[in-house]
Image (cartoon, grey):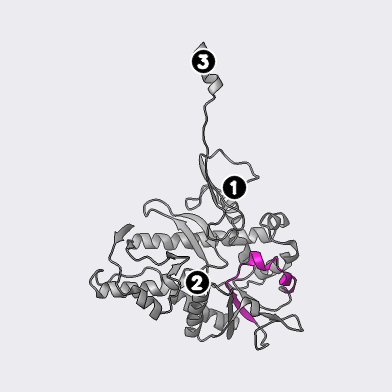
Amino acid sequence: MERVSITERPDWRDKATEYGFNFHTMYGEPYWCEDAYYKLTLAQVEKLEDVTAELHQMCLKVVERVIASDELMTKFRIPKHTWGFVRQSWQTQQPSLYSRLDLAWDGIGEPKLLENNADTPTSLYEAAFFQWIWLEDQINAGNLPEGSDQFNSLQEKLIERFAELREQYGFQLLHLTCCRDTVEDRGTIQYLQDCAAEAEIATEFLYIDDIGLGEKGQFTDLQDQVIANLFKLYPWEFMLREMFSTKLEDAGVRWLEPAWKSIISNKALLPLLWEMFPDHPNLLPAYFAEDEHPPMDKYVVKPIFSREGRTYRLLKTVKRSNPWKARMAKRV
């Protein structure tokens, strides 16, 4: 894997506007950067594909174990009044759309799992679509050789998965929702609507605070239409604690992502993975703070719930000498 510097396209901001990429700059800082790219070999691509497939299956094993244990449901901070709802989503095999595994890798050793964003993953539009536009432009400009390819097939797989949801689970109409004033989330939702349309699924968008509760306990949109299938860019850790959490189990909604994703989008996933698959080459040692663990010189402290790296702490053990012992030795 090689990081290669390359000249930015002079008109990329105009193209971003043309294609609806409205969050290329966020919080006054550039978000989209194209002054370098990563060049991977086919063997490295296949390595990442194999590792992510295995890690995903390992995460599903964690769900299976947590679902069966009151102790672990408590340790994962799943509110007790929602246990039945979360368990039912797993036991009835409620379908998922996608997850994003965050890995650290230098292209030489083993990729290491940092976390699993299994509930509200973004980075879709820019990685699947706008990056493809960049690739075509750079090939046409002669800055990349003919035959260069984007190794991810996100868009194709999303459309394929939406088609499966329509054919196997009866998704004919899909509502999608996110919070207001979240340009990145709204852009991600719009991209997913486009992918769903390619799979012949009708879609309706509404903001999450516009969702109503009907007389029969069903969630409804602004036209009082019952919501049967809902993709949400809104975390389960919030929903399971809010006022309407008591209505979730009886609302009859098929959620994307399903409630069992609240377990593997949770940072408690990491120490349980390490316990279940000790010394796995694609895992970093991880422990619950209250559990015994070997001494560590450098480590990261993560809360069970955290967004975009907030409240992480990077710590280093400082070995201090004993000045009194040194003085006594000098006197002797």
In the image, is residue 224 above or below residue 14? Answer: below
Mark 2 to mark 3 CA distance (whole Å): 63 Å
Residue 316 location in percent, x, y?
Answer: 51, 41
* Secondary structure category for the residue under label 1: loop
Q: Nearer the viewer, residue 155 or 160?
A: 155
Question: Is label 3 in contact with label 1 (beta carbons under 8 Å)?
Answer: no
Q: Nearer the viewer, residue 1 or 45?
A: 1
Residues in magenta, as a range? 228-247
Residue identifier under label 2: 184
The circle on residue 329 is: 3
Q: Name which residue type carries label 3.
A: Ala
Closer-to-camera residue (89/114): 114
Outermost residue, left direction?
Answer: 142
Q: Is residue 294 above or below residue 254?
A: above
Visible residue check, residue 171: no
Q: What crowding class fits label 3: few (fewer than 14 Cα within 10 Å), some (14-19), or many (20 or more)? A: few
Residue at image point 40% right, 67% down: 32
Name the spot of residue 281 as percent of width and height, x first.
47, 50
Residue receiving disc 1: 287
Is residue 238 on the magenta stretch? yes
Of the two numbered discs 2 and 1 on the same chain, state the one appearing first in sequence: 2
Position of residue 123 relative to residue 70, above or below, is below
Does residue 143 appear in the picture of this structure?
yes
The residue tagged with tag 2: helix, strand or loop? helix
The image shows residue 169 at horizontal and vertical percentages of 59, 80
